[in-house]
Amino acid sequence: MNIAIIGYGKMGREVEQMAISRWHTIVLTIDETNADSFSIEDLKKADVAIEFSTPQSAVNNIYKCFEANVPIVVGTTGWLDKMEEVKQVCRDKNQSLFYASNYSIGVNLFFKLNQYLAKLMNTYTDYNVALEEIHHTHKLDAPSGTAISLANQIIKEIDAKQKWVNEPTENKNELSIISKRIGEVPGTHTVTYNSAVDEISITHFAHNRKGFALGAVLAAEFIKGKKGIFGMANLIEKF
């Protein structure tokens, strides 16, 4: 399969190595040196594009892929205020979009665990729940897309929580997300339920970026030849 990588930074290079190890060919890489000049014709060389750029450029990159009739796998977060608009354009143009806040298979299993634990904890009102996420200092958005996904799962299941805030809070209706940016940490997410008598926490700690890269390449393999809007739930069902 021929793959275009849009966003050829550290994550893009991990994707490249993972794709090559799975016998794919990289036909186009986009970074800051050519981000303003790559064309629809350039994209047409690819069977699928994998996008790990910046929140400011992600939507434009998606639309370029739609115009080129190239399915796109998007790993950039921080642009979700445009998600419904992008989904509608995808449907209208009969294109292909695969989006996940996190492509790690382990994180997506962690999502399932988080949802189940929240359901269990809803009736135990003595516990207050909070989130912490730690990423490398180069990450441009806070909180992380993964933390937002975890928070939204919790809000759906915990009656007392109405919204998340990216700061400590004493408001029982708010779910606190604490974001930290430290060194080269690939990503750590912790959900903690705390009461006066004890504490329950679950954590996903990424050792490196390889798990994210593998998931993105698997998503590219999955979406080739398909039309529509997909996510990791669709990919995991395949297995």
Image: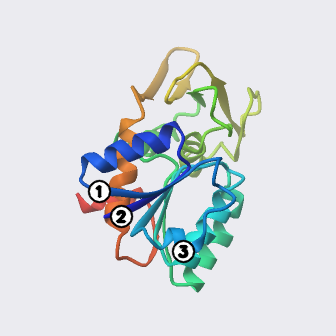
Q: Position of residue 110 (x, y in %)?
A: 40, 39
* SS assignment at label 1: loop
List x then y, in percent, for residue 28: 47, 58
Rounded to the nearest angstrom, the CA distance separating label 3 from label 1 is 20 Å
In this view, the residue in front, 77 or 194, is 77
Q: Which image quarter: residue 161?
A: top right
Q: Residue at x 64, y 24 (%)?
A: 181
What distance separates the C-alpha of mark 1 from that of mark 2? 6 Å
Quarter of image, res 237? bottom left
Q: Which residue is mark 3?
A: 41
The amino acid type found where label 2 is placed reads Asn
Q: Quadrant of the N terminus?
A: bottom left
The residue under the point 53% across, 48% down is 153
Question: Given the image, on which type of amino acid does mark 1 rest?
Answer: His
Q: Residue 21, how many percent across, how many down?
A: 26, 45
Q: Amino acid at mark 3?
A: Glu
What's the mark number on residue 2?
2
SS class, disc 3: helix
Residue 107 shows in this picture: no
Residue at 74 percent across and 30 percent down: it is 167
Categorize mark 2 by other alpha carbons within 10 Å: few (<14), some (14-19), many (20+): some
Question: Quick check: 12 left or right of 223?
Answer: right
Q: From the image, state whether disc 3 or disc 1 is nearer to you.
A: 3
Say if 202 sits above or below 121 in the image. above
Q: Earlier in the sequence, mark 2 or mark 3?
A: 2
Residue at the disc numbered 1:
24
